[in-house]
Amino acid sequence: MKRQLRGQPDPLPASGRGYVHVCPGCAQPMTLHDLRDGDQAYWCHSCNRGHRAGDPPEGALKVQQAS
């Protein structure tokens, strides 16, 4: 995960509970995959792009709707 500079608020929530990883481009849910280096990444099958689980871009986390 990226190191935060002092004095700046953390843009990501402290806990992943209640959040869903979505594609920042098309807002579709992303699937979690294991990588060869032992890390994990989320992948969007409709856009064919993804990001590492520990380094999500802005807009990748969406509050999960209660059902």
Image (cartoon, rainbow, N blue to C red):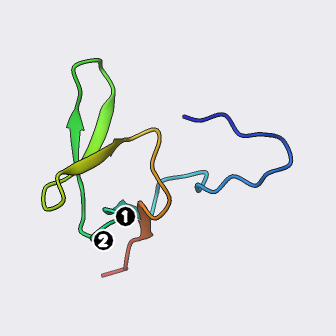
Single out the residue that lies furthest toward the left: 45
- Per the rendering, the mark at residue 24 is 1
Please indicate whether residue 18 sits to the left or right of residue 28 in the image. Answer: right
| Label 1 to label 2: alpha-carbon separation | 6 Å
Q: Residue at label 2?
A: 27
Residue drawn at point x = 50 percent, y = 59 percent: 58
Residue drawn at point x = 66 percent, y = 34 percent: 3
**Figure check: 54 above or below 64:** above
**Rendering coords of residue 10 (x, y %):** 69, 52
Label tally: 2
Q: Quadrant of residue 13?
A: bottom right
Please indicate whether residue 58 sits to the left or right of residue 20 in the image. Answer: right
**Figure check: 18 above or below 52:** below
Front residue (pair 18, 51): 51
Front residue (pair 47, 14): 47
Please indicate whether residue 65 sits to the left or right of residue 43 in the image. Answer: right
Judged from the image, the secondary structure of the residue bearing numbered disc 2 is: loop
Residue drawn at point x = 21 percent, y = 20 percent: 36
Q: As shown in the figure, which amino acid type bears the numbered disc 2? A: Ala
Q: As shown in the figure, which amino acid type bears the numbered disc 1? A: Pro
